[in-house]
Image (cartoon, grey):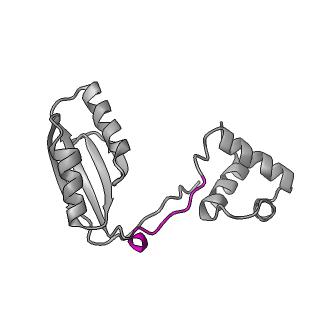
Amino acid sequence: MPLDRIDKHILNQLQRDNRISNQALAEKVGLSAPACLKRVRKLRESGIIMADVSIVNPEAVGHRINVIVEVEMDRDQLDIYEAFNRKMLAAPEVAQCYQVTGEVDFLLMVLVPDMQAYEAFARRELASDPNLRKFRSLISLRREKFQTAIEL
């Protein structure tokens, strides 16, 4: 679905505040309320708007440690990658999982309350995987920027 200027304006506004009323959104983007609602529905139905969520502060709920994990698999094989990906999708500690090109095969963003929880995760999900060649853990000292919005 090609996006026009108004669609992009709607998306930018919703990324800043998805709790905005349809009436207020319509006023901001210069549409009538019914026309705005129709466009938002179309953006959701087409999959451009993937979800409406609340972003939770990890520290406020006890997840104080963010670990970036580089994972190198033993072999470049589709079934091995798919199995690892399924495992990461099921692991609640994994906030994000990317299959990447270059020196490593996957990058993980892991959120845990403490180092003991990370060690348990690493033993259970990483060290025990026979297809994983090696992994490297990078402990984040401080989160300087975190953004979910895509400026359009």
Residue lying at 32% horizontally and 31% vertically, measured from the top left: 82
Asked whether 31 or 97 is in front, the reply is: 97
The magenta span reads: 52-61
Magenta stretch secondary structure, dominant = loop
Viewer-nearest residue: 116 or 149: 116
Task: Answer left or right for 121 relative to 145.
Answer: left
Instruction: Reply yes or no: does residue 60 show up in magenta.
Output: yes
Q: Is residue 103 above or below residue 58?
A: above
As rendered, which of 68 and 6 lies closer to the eye? 68
Q: Residue 9 falls in which quadrant of the image?
A: bottom right
x, y percent for residue 105: 24, 40
- How far across and how far down the image is residue 84, in percent? 28, 37
In the rendered view, would you say 84 is above or below 35? above
Q: Position of residue 121 (x, y in %)?
A: 24, 53
Q: Quadrant of residue 83?
A: top left
Task: Residue 103: tell me if it is visible.
Answer: no
Vertical relation: 74 (above or below) 107? above
Picture residue at 61% right of the left edge, 43% below the top: 48
User: Is residue 19 inside the magenta stretch?
Assistant: no
The quarter of the displayed image where residue 41 is located: top right
Q: Quadrant of the N terminus?
A: top right
